Amino acid sequence: MMDTPSAPHRLNLLHSVLCAVNLGVIMLDGERRIVLWNSWMARHSGLGHEQVIGADFFSVCPGLRGGRVDAAIQQALYNNFPSLLSQTLNKAPFELYANPAAAARNERVQQAVEITPIAVEGAPRHCLIQINDVSIAVGREKLLREQAMVLRSQTFSDGLTGIANRRHFDVAMEKEHRRAKRGGTPLSLLMIDIDHFKAYNDHYGHQKGDQCLIQVAAALAGMLKRPCDLMARYGGEEFAMILPETDVEQATLMAEAIRARTQELAIPHERNNSEAKLITVSIGIATQKVDAAVDIEALIGAADRALYNAKRAGRNRIVARLPD
């Protein structure tokens, strides 16, 4: 017949187990004195058992007084109510560090804290505090968020110029078109094309052509003044600009500013038929009036036809056209 371990032996065994587990374990008595402080806590706090056992919890952890941990301890001791602290709202309440170097940088381990009331026979209720190091999980979530942001950026940004791409344009156009119809406001669309760009590429090479696209895109995107305005690469050397709450007169002023700004870049273009021999743009404008809502295809089609007319008329100019 096996011998039953004695009570002291069972207590020693329990204490050994609690000290061996890979999480912080603190036990408080009814007066909030520390009666258990396991090895994990000693290792990560720098405070040994002999420094904390019997001490008031808030004399050892004064920074926690009056906060969420304090409230949870009171709930456990006096109301027999357990608490699981939100890691999002309480990222690192305890001064715990992975190593001395992290402590020197004041980089606490990220923590998930659980506070549980414990009934003790013949004694006032105790409180168990469990602390899990969730730094790896938090780091993984942060990395996933960053990767998601990069992916979203890649999904909605043109890889060459860095401005919005065609997909971003389509999403924004749908949104602003709905908003214009709902609010009864005008919506203008500018289609912008670099004049004789194929000839530029053939003469200067594709690397220079890419540099030209990047330079023009950056200059024109820098002219946007409102968060709702959008400059996108529509395809090849063609760009599109969405201007919500903008009538045809205002859109024409913006188009003229774009045309002038492009010439100010002074990018040489020997194959341009213009007298200046510089990179220039042609611009087509289409505006949806407040009292004449049209679908998106009609608005884009009108802007395309206006751009075509501007190129036929000699390029480096602006043509506005109402949607059919």
Image (cartoon, helix red, strand yellow):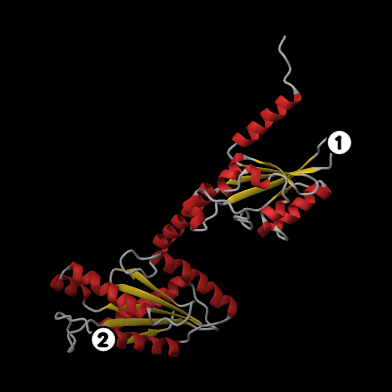
Q: Nearer the viewer, residue 30 or 87?
A: 30
Q: Secondary structure at mark 2?
A: helix
Residue 207, given in percent of the width and then of the height, sits at: 19, 68
Q: Position of residue 269 (x, y in %)?
A: 17, 80
**Label 1 vs 2, first from the N-terminus:** 1
Q: CA distance from mark 1 to mark 2?
A: 90 Å
**Residue 321 appears at what percent x and percent y?**
39, 84
Q: Residue at x 24, y 69 (%)?
A: 210
Between 193 and 51, the one lying in front of the other is 51
Check residue 122 in the rendering and tell me which mark sits there, or answer none. 1
Which of the 4 quarters of the picture holds residue 254? bottom left
Residue at image mark 2: 263
Check the picture and name the quadrant holding the N terminus.
top right
Classify 6 as above or below 95: above
Q: Residue at x 73, y 27 (%)?
A: 8
Instruction: Name the residue type under label 2.
Output: Gln
